[in-house]
Amino acid sequence: MKFMKLGTRPDTFFTEQATRTMVSDLPVDLVIKNNVTTYLLHKSPLNRKCGLLQKLCYDSNDSENVSIELDDLPGGADAFELCAKFCYGFSINISAHNIVSALCAAKFLQMNEFTEKGNFVGKLEAFFSSCILEGWKDSIVTLQTTVKLPEWSENLGITRKCIDSIVEKVITPPSQVRWSYTYTRPGYSRKQCHSVPKDWWTEDVCDLNIDLFRCIIMAIRSTYVLPSQLIGEALHVYTYKMLPGITMVKSSGTLASSQTEESEKNRKILETIVSMIPEDRGSVSVGFLLRLLGISSHLGVSPVTKSELIKRASIQFDEATVSDLLYDQNFYVELVVAVLESFLKLWKRMFSGAVDNRNFLRSITNVGKLIDSYLQVVARDDNMPVSKFVALSETVPAIGRLEHDDLYQAINIYLKVHPDLSKADKKRLCHILDCRRLSAEARAHAVKNDLLPLRTVVQLLYFEQEKGSKVTTTSCKLQKPHELVKKRPATRDSHGKQSSGIDKEELNREGKVLTRRTSLNESREKGTHKTKRSEEKLALELETKMVIRGTKEESNLDPKKENHTKGKK
């Protein structure tokens, strides 16, 4: 940080009660009042450099005491004292921390070249241009101090010049960065990394308030020099710096007024951050968007901001992880459902018009796996109601959940954590499970699972029986016609010609058998389709009867035995 030293005389100002004066042999003839502070000074040194005081003391005699009120002086008592010390020649230091207030006060007091050459305003402006604007951190600190005097800083061009200086340095290629900056990323060491990181500027810029930060970001974006990912990184750093531990705000012991003020401030920050997110996909991570969405539930942001976050998060939802869906170990199932529904609307619209659907199928299956993994986490929450659990699981379409093993694991965890669940809730919970989409291992585990309702176990047993029947049918269907015909050794007829060894009558008989088998298999397949539609009804019947037909019933329906009997006749 650079500074400018002016004056050589030692400072002799001292305070007595609410009055500031100085050690001097000359009698006091000028009284300056600034709010609650009173200064006892002398007209001669101040009038020589302050054009305003010259005008105010113009009608007074040299020996007459003059009292002037300067309550509207920008910068207050501290800024006025810097100007007064400059008039007396006392030693003062000007830096980025006080140059704005000093320059505004000097302008107010008309300490310009017209009043006296080499005056205070000229020296301050020269230091501002040659040192403050040339430095990186000096420009940022100076811009921070303009918050106390926004109108004066804007009118004098201080704010705009600082912003232009900062933006010019931000868009400078990293290889040309020669000034010091703050960079405290985990795992980064300047001794090991000789090159300047591309996002070297983000941490220092994040020291600004939200309005100035927005001015910087929008000015950077208007140059079209930096990629949107760097803009997103700056937004990410600012959010984590300015909005830490939002969940603690409501539980803190602060007064209601200060808590409301803090919430309003944080709400403004969040809404401004969302408005600055670049449109490009990937400019910010889906985890960052979901975090903002989680914070928004605490701050009560506008519906427009919330809808924008849901929309942006749904675009990248297939890139999310389970940890992205958890904010400070809190579960926001409603928000996840909202993002998932928005994703599905977008997916259906894009999927229907796509030439190559493989990427879209991959994305929705990724989302299905994500939701099932998330369900396994939220299932461990004692306060998670069945309605929310079922609502989220049912939102995933069938095409996004080709296998139900992960869903079964989530249901099993929920049943373990909630042992007092009613029978109705258990049936409602297990109703979302499709037994046909479970692996053999999962079905074997489920059949022995005492936590599952009896109806679900019966459905599993019924499916196993149905599957066994399908295997038998398929094996018969896969046999080729010529394999069903028994071949005999080739013989010669009475004329000496070689016979093919196939009896025509036998061929016709086997053909009729094959036809009967095929028709029987087709009827079984039709029955299977009907069975799928009425599976629940059959499961209830099996649940009451708990009887699985035995070998006798199967033998009566066996087409081979029926054909064999007809052959004997």
Image (cartoon, grey):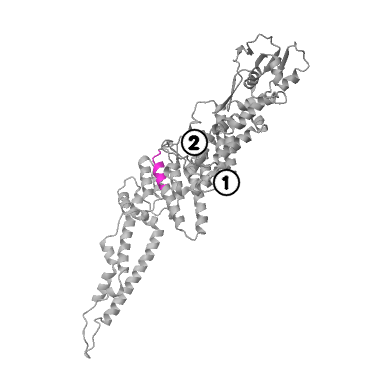
- Magenta stretch: residue 375 in it? yes
User: Where is residue 318 drawn, in percent x and y?
Assistant: 46, 49
Which one is in front, 283 or 497?
283
Query: At numbered mark 2, what does the secondary structure look like: helix, strand or loop?
Result: helix
307 relative to 370 in the view: left or right:
right
Find disc 1 in the rendering and name its residue: 224
Q: CA distance from mark 1 to mark 2?
A: 25 Å
- In this view, 224 is above or below 262: below
Q: Which residue is mark 2?
A: 240
Q: Is residue 526 above or below residue 257?
A: below
Mark 2 is surrounded, within 10 Å at the Cα level, by few (under 14), some (14 to 19) or many (20 or more) other residues, namely few
**Magenta-highlighted residues:** 371-381
Q: Which mark is residue 87?
A: none
Give the mark count.
Answer: 2
**Relative to residue 441, is residue 14 drawn left or right?**
right
* In the image: residue 559, left or right of residue 93: left
Q: Pointers 1 and 2 in contact (CB under 8 A)?
A: no
Report which quarter residue 491 is drawn in. bottom left
What amino acid is found at the position of numbered circle 2 in the picture? Tyr
- Residue 564 in picture, x, y percent from top left: 25, 73
**Residue 288 at what x, y percent from top left?**
48, 41
> Residue 133 colored magenta?
no
Looking at this view, is 300 or 461 the one in front? 300
The quarter of the picture where the C terminus appears is: bottom left
Question: In the visual, does 39 lie left or right of 311?
Answer: right
Q: Quadrant of residue 208?
A: top right
Q: Nearer the viewer, residue 245 or 459?
A: 245
Q: Earlier in the sequence, mark 1 or mark 2?
A: 1
